[in-house]
Image (spheres, grey):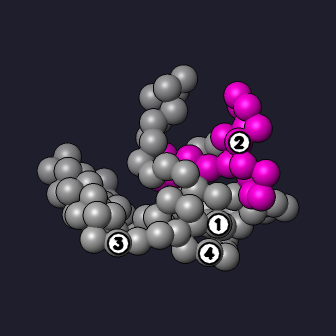
Amino acid sequence: MKNNVRELLPIGSVVLLKEAKKKAMIYGVKQVDKSTGIEYDYIGVVYPEGSMGDGTQFFFNHDIVDQVFFRGFENDERKEFIERLSDYYDKL
């Protein structure tokens, strides 16, 4: 398994997914779909509407991001989080 954690976009990033008509905003990274047990790189909501109740969020992986319109907030706290996450996946 390739560790792609360092490529992950920060939360708050606004992207367009391949074959999508609306933008998405990332609000979580390395999320597990509880109904399937599958881990995804991101969970997002449509932009600019955001969450509109149950079932309006969706999982996706980095490889289907077609365009990045806005890169979310990054600071030392996020850098440390990414380092720890990367170390965790290196050990798997």
- Residue stretch in magenta: 40-57
In primary-sequence order, the first of circles 4 and 2 is: 2
Residue 50 relative to residue 83: left or right: right
Q: Amino acid at mark 1?
A: Val
Q: Amino acid at mark 3?
A: Asn
Q: Amino acid at mark 4?
A: Phe
Q: Which residue is mark 2?
A: 51
In contact (CB < 8 Å): disc 1 and disc 4: yes
Label 1 environment density (alpha carbons within 10 Å; few <14, some 14–19, many ≥20): many
In primary-sequence order, the first of circles 2 and 1 is: 1
Q: Is residue 42 magenta?
A: yes
Q: Is residue 85 magenta?
A: no
Residue 70: image x %, image y %?
62, 75
- The quarter of the rendered structure image containing the N terminus is bottom left
Q: Which residue is mark 1?
A: 14
Residue 47: image x %, image y %?
75, 58
In primary-sequence order, the first of circles 4 and 3 is: 4
Q: Nearer the viewer, mark 4 or mark 3?
A: 3
Per the image, label 3 sits on a secondary structure element best described as loop
